[in-house]
Image (cartoon, rainbow, N blue to C red):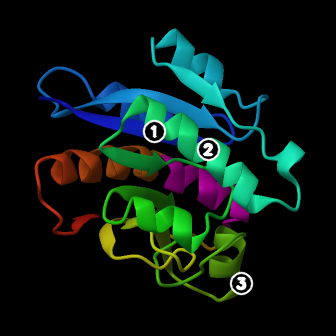
Amino acid sequence: MKKRVAILISGSGSNMIALAESMRGDHPARPCLVLSNSPLAGGLAKAQALGIPTAVVDHRPHKGDRAGFETELLARIEEAGPDLIALAGFMRVLTGDFVARFEGRMLNIHPSLLPKYKGLDTHARAIAAGDTEAGCTVHEVTAALDDGPILGQARVPILSDDTAETLAARVLPMEHALYPAVLRRLCDGNRAPIYLP
């Protein structure tokens, strides 16, 4: 029986595409839902083109009511019945109560070498700090922001003329390689971290 994976996005969905396209053939999982908090997310049309069911829970009508947003989000997710949830550029912070429902079954990809640079503007912060390398991390989601157990990392060198934009452009292909690799291992019951050069 294939595991069911719900993928949550907010934008173009490039990591969602990488995950969805990896879940073919003998892969132990299949995407069951792509859900966005924005009706304008470009990834929704891409998911539909791949034949994946989509849903939108717009966060804007719930301004100041995170519980209401998460109640609606949870209802859509539970309708799909996923075994795992993959956050792929989902730009909403989820509460501890919500995360606890999916403990050990929710993943996120973050564009830094955690525990460095939690939150936003990770590439600019790595350059400003004089770091020699940057990268991305896949981790389990916990109540603390960008703080769960690390399941994989990929590294890229920071070049002397890098900007946040050029560094991000080099990290993104590593995200597209790392996230599917971690997902497959996790679906096979392997939580040992994977490290890509």
- Cβ atoms under marks 2 and 1 closer than 8 Å: no
Rendered position, 118 above or below 37: below
Badge 1 is on which residue? 78
Q: CA distance from mark 1 to mark 3?
A: 42 Å
Q: Quadrant of residue 104?
A: bottom left
SS under mark 3: helix
Q: Is residue 163 magenta?
A: yes
Which residue is rendered at x = 63% and y = 24% of the image? 44
Q: Can you identify the residue that label 3 sits on? A: 128
Vertical order, 46 against 185 (above or below): above
Quadrant position of residue 162: bottom right
Along the viewing direction, whichever of 128 and 183 lies nearer the viewer = 183
Q: Is residue 195 magenta?
A: no
Tag of residue 131: none
Numbered-mark total? 3
Residue plotted at (57% across, 70% down): 159
- Residue 164: image quadrant is bottom right
Residue type at the position of mark 1 = Glu
Task: Give above or below for 77 relative to 25.
Answer: below
Q: Alpha carbon of mark 3 to alpha carbon of mark 2: how far?
A: 37 Å
Kind of residue sitting beneath label 3 = Ala
**Considering only order in the chain, which callout, 2 or 3, is on the residue closer to the N terminus?**
2
Q: Which one is in front, 51 or 94?
A: 94
Q: Tell me the magenta residue range.
A: 161-172
Q: Which mark is residue 73?
A: 2
- At 30% from the left and 34% from the top, the residue drawn is 4
Q: Position of residue 136 (x, y in %)?
A: 46, 64
